[in-house]
Image (tube, helix red, strand yellow):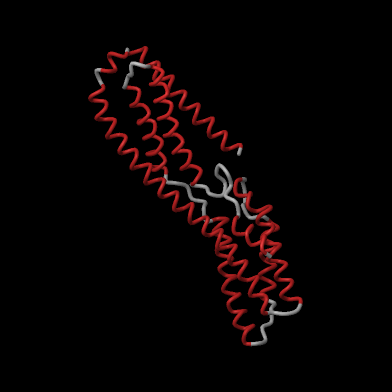
């Protein structure tokens, strides 16, 4: 939540700065001089606005796909834990109870400790969660299938365990890449140019122009902020909650 208000403060500060530069333009060049440029500036501004809109749409689509992929990995991880938990019912005795307890313990550690480590420096994997996961692997390996049904369940359990490992490490380490610098440059530079061109216009009512410039600047910078945050689904403005794990833990 602190990061959210910090970003809002940054957007407001940059928007106020744009308004101050606009007021300086009005005093420096005069409203009549600026009005004489409206026709040419308006044509150029429409082209710049269209290019900037396309660039932002491209980047937003890219980071949104990455966001959905990251959430899908996290949801599938919880699904695999639940699947192994159900498959353990085919085994009797202390083996299945130990495995079930380890699965619940793993899910609880992920929710309580490991999930928020994504917005901290260093290894995002929590040592307790890693130890719990290794315990699950060991327990599955030590299972002794006897009947045909147990053998089928064990084969499926091994498959689900392999997928669980894949989704776990994709959640932890699969989102380490940054947006290419040219894309960031195009978005930020395009935002600055788009806001800058609004300074070449002049309205009769300065208060109305102040509101207009502030809103345009806030809209552009908020889009850039959204791109920067959605790009990191597990450590953005608000950490995406572990819905899959929470739903499963509430039902067992």
Q: Position of residue 142 (x, y in %)?
A: 70, 77
**Extreme residue toward the right, this view:** 94
Residue 192 or residue 82, whichever sits in front: 82
The answer to whether residue 187 is above or below residue 169 is: above
Q: Position of residue 3 (x, y in %)?
A: 58, 37
**In which quadrant of the rendered image does the N terminus lie?**
top right
Quadrant for residue 214, please give it: top left
Q: In this view, does 127 lie to the left or right of 14?
A: right
**Extreme residue toward the bottom, this view:** 147
**In which quadrant of the rendered image does the C terminus lie?**
bottom right
Q: Where is residue 113 in the image (x, y as percent from the top left)?
A: 68, 52
Q: How many labels does the image show?
A: 0
The answer to whether residue 97 is above or below residue 188 is: below
The answer to whether residue 213 is above or below residue 90 is: above
Q: Position of residue 64 (x, y in %)?
A: 45, 50
Q: Residue at x 60, y 46 (%)?
A: 119
Q: Which residue is drawn at 30% across and 38% down?
A: 50
Q: Which residue is drawn at 63% across and 55% down?
A: 125
Residue 20 or residue 135, whichever sits in front: 20
Q: In this view, does 39 lie to the left or right of 239?
A: left
Q: Which residue is drawn at 55% across and 63% down?
A: 76
Q: In this view, does 162 lie to the left or right of 187?
A: right
Residue 207 or residue 115, whichever sits in front: 207
């Amino acid at each position: 939540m602190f990061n959210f208000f910090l970003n809002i403060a940054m957007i407001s500060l940059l928007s106020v700065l744009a308004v101050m530069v606009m007021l300086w333009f009005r005093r420096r060049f005069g409203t009549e001089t600026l009005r004489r440029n409206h026709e040419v500036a308006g044509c150029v501004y429409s082209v710049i606005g269209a290019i900037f809109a396309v660039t932002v749409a491209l980047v937003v689509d890219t980071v949104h796909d990455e966001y959905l992929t990251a959430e899908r990995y996290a949801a599938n991880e919880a699904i695999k834990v639940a699947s192994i938990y159900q498959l353990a019912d085919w085994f009797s005795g202390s083996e299945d109870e130990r495995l079930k307890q380890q699965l619940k313990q793993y899910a609880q550690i992920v929710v309580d400790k490991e999930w928020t480590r994504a917005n901290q420096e260093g290894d995002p994997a929590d040592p307790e969660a890693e130890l719990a996961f290794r315990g699950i692997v060991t327990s599955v390996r030590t299972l002794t299938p006897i009947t045909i049904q147990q053998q089928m369940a064990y084969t499926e359990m091994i498959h689900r365990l392999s997928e669980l490992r894949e989704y776990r490490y994709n959640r932890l380490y699969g989102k380490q890449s940054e947006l290419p610098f040219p894309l960031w440059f195009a978005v930020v530079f395009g935002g600055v140019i788009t806001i800058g061109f609004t300074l070449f216009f002049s309205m009769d009512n300065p208060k109305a122009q102040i509101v207009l410039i502030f809103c345009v600047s806030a809209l552009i910078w908020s889009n850039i902020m959204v791109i920067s945050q959605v790009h990191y689904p597990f450590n953005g403005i608000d950490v995406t909650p572990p819905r899959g794990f929470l739903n499963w833990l509430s039902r067992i």
